[in-house]
Amino acid sequence: MSIRTRFAPSPTGYMHIGNLRTALWAYLIAKKDPEGVFILRIEDTDQGRLVEGATDIIYNTMRECGLKHDEGPDIGGPVGPYVQSERVRSGLYMEYAKKLIDLGGAHYCFCDEETIAKAKAAHTGNGESFKYDDPCKYISKEDAEKRIAAGEPFVIRQTIPAEGTTSFDDEVFGHIEVDNSILDEQVLIKSDGFPTYNFANVIDDHLMGITDVVRGMEYLSSTPKYNLIYDAFGWDKPRYIHCPPVMKDEHSKLSKRNGDASFQDLMAKGYLPEAVLNYIAMLGWSPETNQEIYTLDELVKAFNVKHIGQNGAIFDPVKLTSVNGLWLRGMDLDSYVKLTEPYIRQAVKGNFDIKKIAAGVQQRANTLCEIPPMLDFYDTFPAYSNDLYLNKKMKTNPDVAKETLPACRAVLAEITDWTHDTLHERLMELPAKLEKKNGQVLFPLRVAISGKPSTPGGAIEIAEILGKEETLRRLDLSIAQLENE
């Protein structure tokens, strides 16, 4: 039987990083099987939390990341519909809830949540948990149906055995066994007729043939209750892979409710989808080699659920930025130019060679949004302090600049073939003639024509891009500023 996994987000806002990692791992598990199927299912039964446009965000995020689903709301499939609210309208969940009542796994309940909460509070003491014994369990099915026909509001609750244990095996957390006496008899069908997540996901996973359920470890405690539903129907249970949380720090989970970065936030900050996927794949999973950069296809080959850890993984923006920088520097130049030209053009409006500017930027920028601030000196020569010439590593200061800049100016003024090779050849002759280190010549020159403490590209690259006239103009201004100090 081929592997079938699903990603089942709720359209309640932006794509949380933890949710995206769940989608990625589910995709990788499915695609390790040549016949594997990855399904997208929209779980929108909690109508009060729905956010307009959130479903489109889900589609767009999956598309940007290359996580192509084989079945889903937008492309269809043999076990649709793939939107839970549409399945509600067909009467599907109510049908199965009534079957579960007949099988003894559920019951009608006419007590509201407030009544149950009061009963629990009244019977809880000595720090012990108390499982509220719903009196509606003891109402006959016929009496329950009469009350429903009379218009009494109701929910359908799961019926949990009072004794015994329920156990399951998880690929990450191993064997887990709980006493039935501590399991709450959860609501399966709400008073509005909509199923809860806890019921709908079991029904849908079975009907859609899901073989491997990938979800957050917060659902570990609910899984015994899900398995009791599987057992009541006599269905095969899926393989479980519960994921450790993505953490903001050692104590707090990363959460969109707390304003932590979503996938859309990271895109707005200039990260690449490929780099984000690469990084989050290893939040809680360790590859078998020291390889750090993975394409999606490489992740499919390398991923192994046996290497998922049990502890939460801290989301480190610094590490993500480093991975993103490696992705940017690993691109071929033409692709890099195509990607970065809109960002370069935010700062560079003049008639300069964008490809040459991009070549310098590629070795410096770790995110796309770092690019514009690096390049503002091309269009406008900024005012700067002569203190910029002071650099201990390069052994330069304003006095060294006063000596080397006029010599650079004289050499540059004589050059007629204004190319990188010629500029490099002529300027690199100067240090020996002046009895200076290379940095004592080129560092002051770079400052003198850029007005910046650091730049993408060195003095030779910047001079080539600026052109002879502008380079000499800036040099004259800088030399005058030194002389007038």
Image: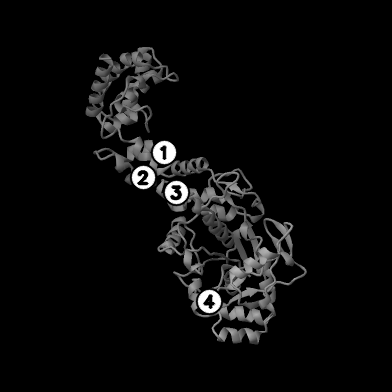
Tag of residue 27: none
Classify mark 1: helix, strand or loop: loop
Nearer the observer: mark 3 or 4; the answer is 4
On the question of residue 209 being in view, the answer is no
The residue carrying mark 1 is 365
| Label 2 or label 4, whichever comes before in sequence order | 4
x, y (%) of residue 225?
67, 68
| Image side of residue 35 versus residue 259, left or right | right
Q: CA distance from mark 2 to mark 4?
A: 51 Å
Q: CA distance from mark 3 to mark 2?
A: 16 Å
The residue carrying mark 2 is 340
Image vertical order of residue 267 relative to residue 94, above or below: above
| Label 1 or label 4, whichever comes before in sequence order | 4
The residue carrying mark 4 is 193
| Label 3 or label 2, whichever comes before in sequence order | 3
The N terminus lies in which quarter of the figure?
bottom right
